[in-house]
Amino acid sequence: MANYEAEFSNLVRSFRKRHMGKGPSQIKTTFCKNWAICEMQGNLSPVEKFIATADTGKQMLRSARTEMVKDMYHKNRPVEMEELLGATFQDLFVDIDIERDFGMTIFVFDQDLEKKFSSDR
């Protein structure tokens, strides 16, 4: 399973780089049931870090990042991820802690990824 989780992390990084201009510096993916849970560090650009120095900037960034990331995946189906997993992307949940520059994204697929890839251990 670790090989698929690592490859999924690489696909998330390249997808975000392609669509947002920057991907997270570190990603750790864990498959749990039909979820691919990605913990991400180093998400913010230098400009976003500057904006986050103001309290109003932190909330604005959090709101914008969570909504824009969700919208990005719904407008640009993550075909490479679906091909790697042999599963169909259904939805995702996104959150970010601006102060720690730590984000989490939970990708929801139509199959039990944990069960499907557990023999890969």
Image (tube, grey):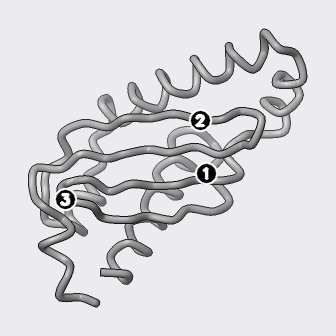
Residue at mark 2 to residue at mark 3: CA–CA distance: 22 Å
Question: Which of pointers 1 and 3 indicates the residue nearer the eye?
Answer: 3
Residue at mark 1 to residue at mark 2: CA–CA distance: 14 Å
Q: How dense is the environment of label 2, judged by Cα within 10 Å: few (below 14), some, or many (20 and up)?
A: many
For the point 26% across and 53% down, which residue is it?
A: 35
For the point 88% across and 16% down, which residue is it?
A: 54
Q: Is residue 21 above or below residue 60?
A: below
Q: Dot 2 corresponds to which residue?
A: 96
Kind of residue indicated by mark 2: Ile
Left or right: 61, with 96 as reference point? right
Q: Element under label 2?
A: strand
Q: Which label's residue is closer to the chain start, 1 or 3?
A: 1
Q: Dot 3 corresponds to which residue?
A: 33
Q: Which label's residue is closer to the chain start, 1 or 2?
A: 1
Q: Give the farthest residue toward the top.
A: 56
Q: Dot 1 corresponds to which residue?
A: 23
Residue 70, quarter of the rendered image = top left
